Image: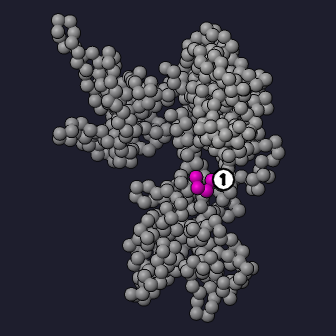
Amino acid sequence: MRKKLTALACALALCISLAPAASAAQSGQGEVLQVLSVMGVMNGDANGNLNLSSNVTRAEFTKMAVAASVYKDTATATSYVSPFSDVKYTHWAAGYVKTGVDAGWINGYLDGTFRPNNSVKWEEAVTICLKMLGYTDEDFSTGTYPYPQLALAQNLKLATGIGAKQGEALTRQECAQLIYNTLNATAKGGQPYASTLGYSVDAAGNIDYLSVVNAELEGPIIVGSGSWTSDLGFTPAAVYRNDSESTASAVAENDVLYYLEKTKTVWAYHNQVTGIYESASPSRSNPTSVVVSGVSYSFETSAAAYSMSTTGSYQPGDAVTLLLGRDNTIAAVSDPSQISDTTYGIVLGTGTTTYTDAQGKPYTAPYVKILGMDGMTYQYQAEQSGYYKEGDLIRVSFEDGKVKLSRISSSSKGLSGTVNSAATKLGSYTFADDVRIMDYADEAAVTIRPSRLAGVRIDSGDVAYYELNGAGEIETLILKNVTGDMYSFGILTDDEGIPGVGLGGTVEITGHMYTIQSNGTTVGPLVCDGITFPVSAGDAVRYRLDGSELSKMYSLTDVRLNSVSSSEAVASNNQKFNLENGVQVYERRYQSGLGTQYYLTSIDQVSGGDYTLTGWYDKAESEGGRMRVIVAVAK
């Protein structure tokens, strides 16, 4: 689950953090311009301006079309022939025009010219896009140009969001919309055009933005001791580190980088795991994954896999540091002695197990299982059994290639106060730029960013441990169930008692079968024999699964809502809740023969005043809580 959450967080960061986002938002074409920017179809000028109201020349539109086609990776600006008398081989667009001619998309005028600097007209741009979709001149032989072309464009919805008419020149904004509509159109062969370019599409056949990002993203590369921007070959316009907005100066040695040169955007990840290399699968000669300190990791690069193979530098029993990329996969492997890596966790249990030494021989030794600050469960070999107990706070470090475990005292040292709105300070203490914050409860944990704690009051009893760096800033903070984000949330849709025979042959309820609707997925029925939770069907609940067993479940607090928007819910008592961090929204309906049903929906669908709204929250936002569920009932 943690890996899935990490991948989801990375994907979300990619979605919202591209360089042209501000211009996109201003134009109302957010996703259109983001997709085209990542594909290299449309980028801003030297100052980042998209100049959306400017006209587009025939040469410029040809380049845009090529960038949105199967020729996007092979076409170049340079051509060694002159495709038209007024497009010499030295012309900046000669290569793109030549590609368009070879593909059969464009024709010149009767005098043998292309007139590259003329503004492209609506019918000209439409004809190019139709030919990109696989249509030919034969498909338009029943009418006079451009009427068959314009009619087909309407049928294929290429004109959606565009007000231009025949004979009118197109602006950059209109050209962007036309290319985007083409990506979402059905090609002549019957498949979505975007899929012919290797991109995923949704159920409606529309291009999936994340698939565009993933297809165009380059990397990973590992930051060395030199100038990483020189290695990239461009100066980043935007840098994100561990999914937060950052700067180029914050990128450190051994960070794992991904980049989009077209948008001059860089994503850096500093996610290192140090542990004992235990085994490889399916074999050491050709590993696709390895187990390090009880956790399995797959490889992202062949170089990393080679380093842990039979011919590589590391073998079972060695201490290794894994440099993990954006999907928690191994981008590179390093010697722990070259990396300062100390982490913390909570002991979940102890025991004895079998290990393999460097010669491949098995031996038995005690182990300690801990819940790390990243929410993952690790298992380390202990020097002695019985020393560590469940619930102990523990420090994990490595010296001379060996793991060193040490118990630390649970201490808040008087730390308390409110996190400021900028999430840069807790009381009088400043958060370090690379602060690590963990929140845990009930053998589950979540890594959180300082922004999650903005405005939250933290008392000393909420703090299990914290540590300051040399500058007196908080660099490590372990909290005790402040946010509740380690739990799952949903609607309890069914609570069925399990009957049993009591004293004197009476029938008693000995347990329950619970069914939960969570994020549109049915969880259960979960059989809880001998266990009854204080909840009722129809309640929004906070719960935790231990494997397939329901270990914790509590009802949330409900409040009638007067209004909701994408960012805020206002209760009937005027209490306000921030919804920007996500909330599950359900419409409750009664259906004959099925009873009460809950259907996952969205804020937009229920915010018009036609529904009675009930919100469910775990605790006040000033205490770290959130509005978790909203239930809508049609009036």
Q: In which quarter of the image is residue 340?
A: top right
Q: Which residue lies furthest to the top in this view?
A: 504
- The residue located at (61%, 8%) in the rendering is 386
Residue lying farthest to the right in this orientation: 226
Residue 33 x/y as whole percent: 55, 60
In the image: residue 436, left or right of residue 158: right
User: Hey, which quadrant is residue 149 in on the image?
Assistant: bottom left
Magenta-colored stretch includes residue 215: yes
Mark 1: secondary structure: strand
Q: Label 1 crowding class (10 Å Cα cut-off): few <14, some 14-19, many 20+?
A: some
In terms of depth relative to the viewer, which is nearer, 568 or 633? 633
Kindly tell me whether residue 30 is visible in this rendering.
no
In the image, residue 9 above or below residue 276: below
Kindly report the secondary structure that dominates the magenta region of the rendered protein: helix
Mark 1 sits on what residue? 218
**Residue for point 76% across, 36% down:** 313
Residue 337 in view in this figure: yes
Residue, x 79% and y 32% (percent of image)? 338
Does residue 158 lie above or below 410 as drawn?
A: below
Q: Which of 158 and 120 is in front in this view?
A: 158
Give the image location of residue 444, x and y in percent. 51, 24
User: In the figure, residue 532 lies in which quadrant?
Assistant: top left
Is 393 on the left or on the right of 628, as rendered? right
Specify the segment rendered in magenta: 214-218
Number of dots carrying numbers: 1
Q: Residue 191, position in %: x, y?
A: 43, 65
Please indicate whether residue 363 sits to the left or right of residue 173 in the image. Answer: right
Foreground of the two, 334 or 43: 334
User: Percent position (x, y) of residue 303?
Assistant: 71, 44
Q: Which residue is drawn at 53% across and 60% down?
A: 198
